[in-house]
């Protein structure tokens, strides 16, 4: 029986509950490298009393004290990820994120 390949994820866990998923990949070494870089940035930012900076997948900076953990965890198996019958995931994989959800038609929903 072939061993299922795992998908791993690196997540910055914030005290306010707005956790940031940084990367997901079946390449453990790539995820570990990302985790190591995030851990180093967190430690350095804390020592230097400066904001923790993140530029991918979002550009943001916030107090390192808002982080309680940066973790590397198995998310799922590749087989399970490919067998997902989530229609939004399938549409996003084939058409991209911007085409997945209906557009507001240029209307600013916040101005109403």
Image (cartoon, rainbow, N blue to C red):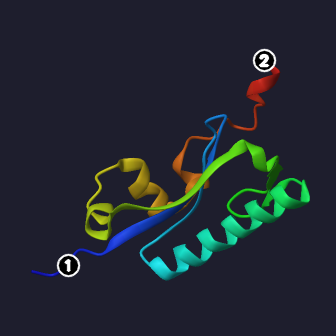
Position above or below: 35 against 98: below
Pick out the residue farthest to the front: 47
- Can you say which quadrant of the picture contains the N terminus? bottom left
Q: Nearer the viewer, residue 38 or 25?
A: 38
Residue 67: percent from left, percent from top: 68, 47
The residue tagged 2 is 112
Distance between the alpha carbons at the discs numbered 2 and 1: 53 Å
Residue 98: percent from left, percent from top: 61, 53
Position above or below: 64 against 79: above
Which label lies toward us, 2 or 1? Answer: 1
Name the mark on residue 53.
Answer: none
Residue 107: percent from left, percent from top: 76, 31
Q: Nearer the viewer, residue 81 or 2?
A: 2
Mark before the other along the chain sequence, 2 or 1 = 1
The residue tagged 1 is 3
- Can you say which quadrant of the picture contains the C terminus? top right
Which residue is at 44% across, 55% downward? 91
What is the number of callouts on the image?
A: 2
């Amino acid at each position: 029986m072939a061993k299922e390949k795992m998908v791993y994820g690196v997540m910055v866990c914030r005290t306010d509950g707005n956790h940031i998923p940084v990367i997901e990949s079946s390449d453990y070494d790539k995820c570990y490298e990302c985790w190591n870089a995030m851990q180093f940035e967190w430690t350095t930012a804390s020592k230097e009393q400066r904001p923790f900076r993140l530029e991918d997948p979002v550009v943001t900076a916030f107090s390192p004290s808002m982080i309680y953990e940066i973790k590397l965890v198995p998310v799922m198996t590749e087989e399970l990820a490919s067998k997902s019958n989530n229609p939004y995931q399938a549409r996003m994989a084939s058409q991209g994120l911007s085409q997945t959800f209906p557009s507001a038609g240029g209307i600013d929903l916040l101005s109403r």
